[in-house]
Image: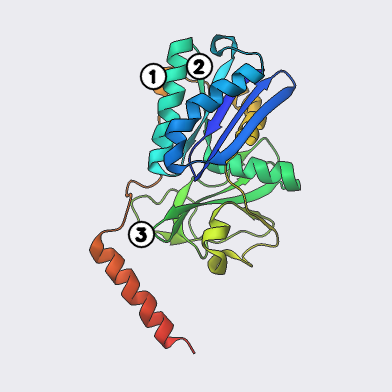
């Protein structure tokens, strides 16, 4: 297949192009730079691959969950490129991309993917490849690092705690942000971000499942609507942390 894939859901900008069995990719700092670098880097990779936009089969984009600004950047680029070149787009869940990375790197068949959601929370979902292709054992949710205790979306509820089921590998960038809370929660763990190469690996199966969409349907996946804590919430969290520190032996 001939595909352009990119993800800007974290602080990393990940882009990859596939032309048949050959891939070209770039990983670099994202965040505020993603909006400036995404299109020039994508076009440069297409040139290296000897492809023009209209020659592609689809635009593959990371739809989220993740950083709000990053998701809007990816969706705007995917929609604009797909519309301009009269292509379809393929959304790829960021947590699924992390799980696929763990499968490719470690051979993991069951993965608890965890992305930093800020505000002392993580985006998480347990994913498995058995007995069928990748599927979620539960919907993505916003959770507190700790123990997973819900089986359904909990957007309207207070965040539950994260639990890693037996036999699952823990993978994601939340391992770096919350090492004390997450280390030791699983037998194996892997620091990972959503990568465009993992998205390319997933693309054929997702396309076969009929998940291609028209440019007008491109949209981010928001698991949590809240972007930041209020001043009162930050003060309360700070006071709680100080109280816990003083009570510690």
- Return the mark for residue 43: none
Q: Secondary structure at mark 1?
A: helix
Please tell me which residue is depicted at 32% across the width and 76% down the height of the picture.
Answer: 239
Determine the residue positioned at 66% across, 22% down.
18
User: Is residue 179 in sight in this rendering?
Assistant: yes
Residue at the disc numbered 1: 216
Residue 229 percent location from the top left of the image: 30, 58
> Which residue lies at the image location 64% right of the left edge and 36% below the top edge?
198
Tell me the residue that label 3 is attached to. 158
- Label 3 crowd (10 A; few <14 / some 14-19 / many >=20): few
Location of residue 52 (image quadrant): top right
* SS at badge 3: loop
Q: Position of residue 106 (x, y in %)?
A: 74, 48
What residue appears at the point 45 percent right and 50 percent down from the top-left corner?
141
Q: Which residue is situated farthest in the bottom direction here?
A: 249
Label 1 vs label 3, nearer the camera? 1
Residue 43 in percent (x, y) is at 55, 20
Tell me the CA gap for discs 2 and 1. Answer: 10 Å
Quarter the N terminus occupies: top right
Residue 6 position (above or below residue 214): below
The residue to which callout 2 is attached is 88
């Amino acid at each position: 297949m001939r595909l352009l894939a990119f993800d800007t859901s974290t602080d990393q900008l990940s882009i990859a192009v596939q032309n048949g069995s050959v891939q070209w990719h770039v990983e670099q700092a994202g965040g505020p730079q993603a909006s400036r670098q995404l299109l020039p880097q994508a076009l440069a990779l297409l040139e290296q691959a000897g492809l023009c936009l209209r020659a592609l089969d689809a635009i593959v984009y990371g739809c989220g969950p993740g950083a709000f600004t990053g998701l809007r950047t990816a969706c705007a680029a995917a929609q604009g490129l797909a519309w301009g070149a009269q292509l379809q787009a393929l959304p790829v869940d960021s947590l699924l991309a992390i799980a696929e990375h763990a499968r490719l790197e470690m051979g993991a068949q069951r993965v608890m993917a965890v992305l930093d959601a800020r505000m002392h929370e993580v985006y998480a979902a347990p994913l498995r490849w058995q007995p069928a292709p990748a599927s979620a054992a539960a919907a993505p949710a916003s959770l507190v690092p700790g123990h997973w205790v819900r089986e359904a979306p909990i957007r309207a509820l207070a965040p539950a705690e994260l639990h890693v089921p037996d036999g699952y590998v823990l993978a994601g960038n939340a391992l770096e942000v919350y090492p004390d809370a997450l280390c030791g929660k699983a037998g194996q763990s892997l620091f990972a971000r959503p990568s465009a190469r993992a998205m390319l690996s997933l693309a054929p199966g997702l396309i076969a499942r009929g998940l291609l969409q028209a440019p007008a349907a491109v949209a981010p996946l928001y698991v949590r609507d809240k972007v930041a804590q209020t001043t009162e919430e930050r003060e309360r969290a700070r006071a709680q942390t100080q109280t816990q520190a003083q009570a510690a032996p």
